[in-house]
Amino acid sequence: PRLSGEDGGASLLSDPGALPRAGGARRRRAPLGRSGAGRSGRVPRGRPRLPRQARRPGRPREVVRVSRTPPARERLRCVLFDVDGTLIDTLDDIAGSVNHMLRSLALSERSIEEVRTFVGRGVRQLILRSVGEEREELVERGLDLFSRHYEIHCLDRSRLMPGAAECLDRFAGRDLGIVSNKTEHFVRRMLDGLGIAGRFRAVYGGDSVAERKPSPLMVRAALEALGRRPEEAILVGDLPVDVETGRAAGVFTVALLGGFGTGAELEAASPDLILDGLAELARRFA
């Protein structure tokens, strides 16, 4: 699939067998299986295959969707990354600290899937949704309990997302920045702990500027610090809030599958481009 949007910017999620060809027309790809295989049962050489993640049961197929033309490689000077679910898989440690907080407040624990849906709008929203919006009076105490526990355990099980180190290597020489709703203290602690802090010239957390994402203030502050214009940058994230932020800031926004957002959520948010992960990001832009 082409990045130029020649196919009208349409998503390939619903019909991965429809492959664009010259002039914007499409041809159908024969389905894989008995009818499409040779006598040996093997798929004929040269036939396109779905990416590995797309072949896993229950996972969304890869989306390559372009709603506007991305910056050309030679004009791309800046890449801004979200953290949770984009560069670092933090879900287990966040859920562990959320459930420590809930036990301390004599409340029922949350499943890891519930916690996943609470992440992305900042720690206060995480705590409010975890304790329940009808218990708003518990938020301050919950924040304290969560923060104390997370300070000790934020790197117990958190790891770089697949392809993160290689992706950052490929973007060496460009200005890299962080724009996360996670508090800046924890952002820097995790970047240091996982050995990637030196890759970033600008680091912004949810308490670094007056407004969190989806406000564009954080992105604008990062671009100003790096001396870059919106048209020279891309924003990479894994949740609809990242898409909203990029749109508000006028920055080409790439949403990645495999993080905290589902394929359906990202498709509904209409980012400029949806890709299968960091390795694909590096192949297309580095």
Image (cartoon, helix red, strand yellow):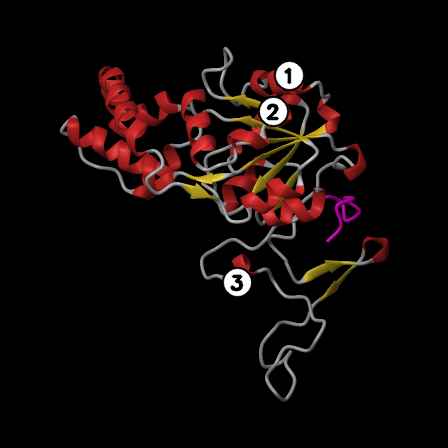
Q: Is residue 209 above or below residue 16?
A: above
Q: State the residue at coordinates (62%, 22%).
A: 248
The answer to whether residue 8 is magenta is yes
Q: Secondary structure at mark 2?
A: loop
Residue at the bottom extreme?
39
Q: Secondary structure at mark 3?
A: helix
Q: CA distance from mark 3 to mark 1?
A: 41 Å
The residue carrying mark 2 is 201
Residue identifier under label 3: 55
53 or 21, nearer to the observer:
53
The kind of residue tagged 1 is Ala
The residue positioned 71% from the left and 38% from the top of the image is: 67
Q: Which residue is mark 1?
A: 225
Query: In terms of secondary structure, where does tag 1 sit?
Result: helix
In the displayed structure, would residue 30 be above or below residue 65? below
Residue 121 position, x and y percent, is 43, 26
Residue stretch in magenta: 1-9
Q: Earlier in the sequence, mark 1 or mark 2?
A: 2
Choose mark 3 or mark 2, whichever is in front.
Answer: 2
Residue 179: % across, % down: 54, 25
In the image, 88 versus 249, the foreground residue is 88
| Magenta residues, dominant SS class | loop
Camera-nearest label, 1 or 2: 2
Q: Residue 215 in the image: x percent, y percent?
A: 55, 18
273 shown above or below 191: below
**Mark earlier in primary sequence (3, 1):** 3
The extreme top residue here reads 210
- In primary-sequence order, the first of circles 3 and 2 is 3
Q: Classify residue 268 by image quadrant.
A: top right
Q: Residues within 10 Å of mark 3 (few under 14, many from 20)?
A: few
The amino acid type found where label 2 is placed reads Arg
